[in-house]
Image: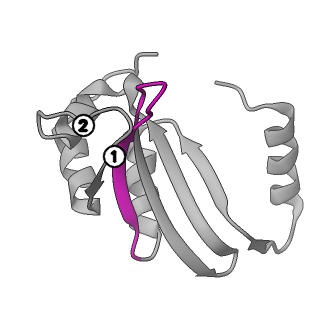
Amino acid sequence: MYPSDDARQLGMLLRISRRIDIVGDVSVTVDDPAELLAWASMLPSPQVIAWRGLESDKRYAQVSAAHHRSPIHGMATAVLMCDGHRTFWDKLMDGGEIEPGTERPLGVEDLAMAWEQTPLEPPTR
């Protein structure tokens, strides 16, 4: 997936800036479970949830944390769309499922365990 023109422009601005402070919330989408686990490992005291969209029925795993030091002063959130990573999702749900419009609290250890148990395979879309 190629970034939009706006995302490319922001990326260039971030690379040429000597120092950056983001005051406000930051949300990113990640492409695979390893990236989500990396965010969970780097954020202070992250909250991890799995949730399904009410209308779309899509599956997501999300890591969020309040961040109060440079470069981010606000809530940082990383989200993985799990419909393209069903094996990871199934391991994360421990063989169960959640209903559309609901969420399940998890921990970083749940992400790590699901990632360890997921065979490496290209994502489906």
Q: Position of residue 69 (x, y in %)?
A: 63, 83
Segment colored magenta: 45-59
* 1 or 2: tag closer to the N-terminus: 1
- Give SS at disc 2: loop
Q: Within 10 angstroms of label 1, few (less than 14), some, or many (20 or more) residues?
A: many
- Seen from the viewer's position, the closer of residues 122 and 50 is 50
Residue closest to the far top: 125
- 65 left or right, relative to 105: right
Q: Position of residue 12 (x, y in %)?
A: 85, 49
Q: Residue at label 1? A: 50
Q: Residue at label 2? A: 98
In the image, residue 50 above or below residue 68: above
Q: Position of residue 47 (x, y in %)?
A: 38, 65
Residue closest to the far bottom: 69
- Seen from the viewer's position, the closer of residues 116 and 63 is 63
The numbered dot on residue 28 is none
Q: Please identify the quarter of the rendering in which residue 67 is found.
A: bottom right
State if disc 2 and disc 1 touch (CB < 8 Å). yes
How are the residues colored? one colour
